Image (cartoon, rainbow, N blue to C red):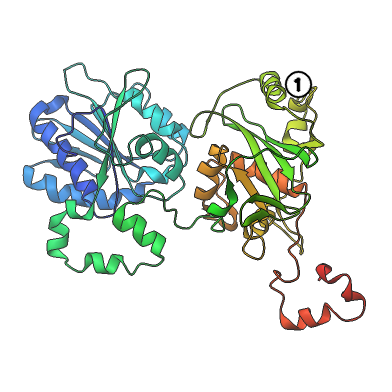
Amino acid sequence: MLVNCPVAEIFYGGARAGGKTDGMIGKNAIKAARYGEHQRGIFFRRELPQLEAAIDRCKQIYFPLKWGWAEQKKTFTAPNGATLRFRPLERDSDAEKYQGHDYTDVYFEELTNYPDPRPINKLRATLRSGHGVPCQFHATGNPGGPGHQWVKERYITPAPQGYKVIVDRDGNERIFIPAKVEDNPALTDADPLYISRLKQVGSEALVKAWLEGDWNIVEGAFFDCWSAKMILQPFAVPEHWLKFRSFDWGSAAPFSVGWWAVVTDNFMVSEGFSLPRGALVRYREWYGKKKANIGLKMTAEQVSRGIRDRSLEKVAYSVADPAIFAQDGGPSISERMFPVNFNRADNKRVGAHGMMGGWDQMRARMQGEEDKPMVYCFHTCVDSIRTIPALQHDPKRMEDLDTNAEDHAADEWRYALMSRPYIRSQAAMPVKKDRWDRAFDGDYKENWKTL
């Protein structure tokens, strides 16, 4: 399907070992045989060392076809003059190096390794041919990784079963082709135990993602305590509940605004299910995105008006990233948003010296106690639900999340939760026995939570 597909933009992804790399290399060879020197392909991965396996595979396929290889230029050249280059692409600035280049085919391997689509989008401008070669963008990838959400939103969500041409408002076409292990019989014939070994790689979530290409499974999520129990059907929020707002600024990147209510007493949502006293409920959000991780580029004044228009009730206070209060030769973002007033949020991400950081607060509330979370959101808060469960660990600092990903809603949740610190009850606290005993001795009897 990949080789014969004429659609201008193709994402071939899902299960591992579906022959994705062979498909792109093989398709390039077929187009090279047809269009000769006018066929100009370029193959990208995040880092140069990651290209080695694809280059080795390309040698196995192309050398018998008499293609040459230039090590310094990282370029294959066919006898008829067709070329295929291999290049790393990590940052936006890397994409700018190709301004003015012309290619008939752009290939990206492991697209979900890219947390942001912007450097990939810049490469689309290089697709052009003055000789009638049909230009195509090809990409492969597996579920998971820092780019999981934007890739899923662009290719999988519009047509989860795949094989359907998606047409955007500008008339551009794209298609998702699901990859399956069964698509690569050469591998399973040569290595019959491959699937059995894949089932032993670790967690059930990872096996399901790799073997079945399930895009609803996120392995290694930073908030692995996120639960479907946290998502509520909207209801009329009682007037007497305290309400407040939280805000994370963005212009080129999305901004996020959340409206929250504090449950003041056990509140029955439905028969047999009640919200615990002290829980936070996110009942409204405004997420300013043009597309995944791309902002609306609205001014502070425009965002302020939007917040006022959406604030249908009185709020007790509002918190925001302290960065909006910075002055740099003119009024701050906060001043430009008047009359919407914000307090400086506690911006602590990771705890230190025994103090809980913002991510600890989120985890604690998500876990809750007695099988009940202490933070919830209405199912209408679609961008929180879309982005937060998919966030990954920072590979260099595991106690923090990867800030290259779409973390704007998560940051805004952090400001909100840090404004109302939560301490789990003694029954839910994982206290060691010697400390538990001391909690009920002497002065600790009433102050055990300080341990």
Rendered-image quadrant of the N terminus: top left
Residue at 57% from the left image edge and 31% from the top image edge: 253
Rendered-image quadrant of the C terminus: bottom right
**Is 227 displayed left or right of 125 in the figure?**
right
- The answer to whether residue 46 is seen in the rendering is no
| Residue pointed to by mark 1 | 336
Q: Quadrant of residue 252?
A: top right
- The answer to whether residue 301 is seen in the rendering is yes
**Is 131 displayed left or right of 317 in the figure?**
left
Rendered position, 20 above or below 92: below
Q: In the image, residue 319 lies at what x, y percent?
A: 76, 38
Q: In the image, residue 101 lies at what x, y percent?
A: 31, 24
Residue at 16% from the left image edge and 59% from the top image edge: 187
Residue at 48% from the left image edge and 34% from the top image edge: 292
Residue at 19% from the left image edge and 23% from the top image edge: 134
200 vs 260, nearest the viewer:
260
Q: Which amino acid does the dot numbered 1 rest on? A: Arg
Q: In the image, residue 267 lies at what x, y percent?
A: 71, 51
Rendered position, 48 above or below 165: below
Residue most toward the front? 271
The secondary structure type at the circle numbered 1 is helix
**Is 40 displayed left or right of 282 in the figure?**
left
**Is 133 displayed left or right of 300 in the figure?**
left
Q: In the image, residue 312 lies at what x, y percent?
A: 72, 27
Rendered position, 2 above or below 309: below
407 vs 102, nearest the viewer:
407
